[in-house]
Image (cartoon, helix red, strand yellow):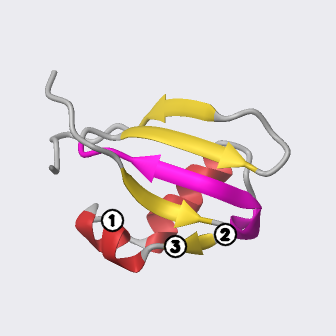
Amino acid sequence: MQTSLPVLIVEEGKFDEHNVELSKRDEHYFLGVLKDHGCDELKKVLVFTVDGTGKSYLQVKGEKYEVFNLNWEEALW
């Protein structure tokens, strides 16, 4: 499996618009991912990263971090 460097999608409750665009997804997609992982408010996210293969890291304020994979059909970068 090919690896790639992660990019920042959300930091301190705010989307990084450039990296969201790079992912070929939109904010609504990532809001759904956050909701699926128990975070219903963007402002609670300290950091959310994703690499080109869909491997993700999520740190929500006051909670243990979580690492998971998004089911992306192909590597993006």
Label 1 or label 2, whichever comes before in sequence order: 2
Residue 62 appears at what percent x and percent y? 85, 45
Mark 3: secondary structure: strand
Assess disc 2: are there few (<14), some (14-19) or many (≥20) residues with their C-alpha within 10 Å of its C-alpha.
Answer: some
Q: Amino acid at mark 3?
A: Phe
Q: Nearer the viewer, mark 1 or mark 3?
A: 3
**Image vertical order of residue 21 relative to residue 37, above or below:** below
Mark 1: secondary structure: loop
Residue 48 within the segment the image draws in magenta? yes
**Real-space Cα distance between discs 1 and 3?**
12 Å
| Magenta residues (range) | 41-52
Residue 13's label in the rendered image is 2
Residue 9 appears at what percent x and percent y? 45, 62
**Real-space Cα distance between discs 1 and 2?**
18 Å
Number of numbered labels in the structure image: 3
**Real-space Cα distance between discs 2 and 3?**
7 Å
Residue indicated by mark 3: 15
Residue indicated by mark 1: 25
The answer to whether residue 68 is left or right of residue 26 is right
The answer to whether residue 7 is left or right of residue 76 is right
Q: Nearer the viewer, mark 1 or mark 2?
A: 2
Mark 2: secondary structure: loop
**Image vertical order of residue 18 relative to residue 60, above or below:** below
Residue 42 within the segment the image draws in magenta? yes
Residue at image coords 33%, 65%:
25
Quadrant holding the N terminus: top left
Residue at image coords 25%, 38%:
53
Residue 44 appears at what percent x and percent y? 76, 61
Q: Amino acid at mark 1?
A: Arg
Q: Amino acid at mark 2?
A: Gly
